[in-house]
Amino acid sequence: MNKQKTINTFKDLLIWQKGMDIVLDIYKIVASFPAEEKFGLTSQIKRCAISIPSNIAEGWGRNSSGSYAQFLKIARGSLLELETQIIIANKLSLLKENEFEKLSNIITEESKMLNAFIKKIEISILQSNTN
């Protein structure tokens, strides 16, 4: 039997949980970056990683599906920004290959989840507008 978990808060959303996992992974990985990157790439990577679950949570707190979809799109933008930055870090040899692969995989997974959730909300908005 397939039991659906009740969503009572943004913390119950798998996309938020995955976003939090990304933040924790990022903080662990960038701790080994050179000190001269502290105010450069390290800071930027941390900021956009934090933005992902933060925008998912903020959107949850809005009173409209349209606003929520917009915050999910901002989270998706931050995710793509993070992907670009880890590619840069990899090209600069700041990431180990296994770290890069792990981050790339989790980013791809989160991107697919966000895209599906955004689509679901947008379909719901269209259906409510036609009724």
Image (cartoon, rainbow, N blue to C red):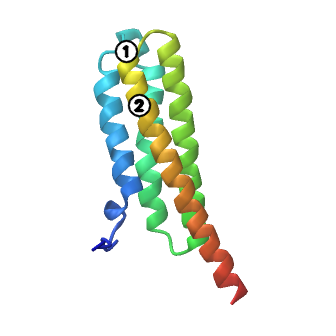
Q: Within 10 Å of the Cα at label 1, are there few (<14), some (14-19), or many (20+) other Cα atoms?
A: few
**Quadrant where the image shows the C terminus:** bottom right
Nearer-N-terminus badge (2/1): 1
86 displayed left or right of 130: left
Q: Quadrant of residue 47?
A: top left
In this picture, is 1 found above or below 51? below
Q: Which residue is mark 2?
A: 103
Residue type marked 2:
Leu
Residue at the spot 42% in from the left edge and 23% down from the top edge? 100
Q: From where the camera sits, is residue 71 visible?
A: no
Residue at the spot 64% in from the left edge and 83% down from the top edge? 128
State the SS at label 1.
loop
Spatial CA distance of label 2 from label 1 is 11 Å
Q: Percent from the top left, x then y, of residue 1?
A: 27, 74
Which disc is residue 96 wearing?
1
In this picture, is 29 found above or below 126? above
Q: Percent from the top left, x then y, of residue 8?
A: 32, 73
Q: Are the residues at dot 2 and dot 1 in contact (C-beta closer than 8 Å)?
A: no
Residue type marked 1:
Lys
Q: Residue furthest bottom?
A: 131
Q: From where the camera sits, is residue 105 visible?
A: yes
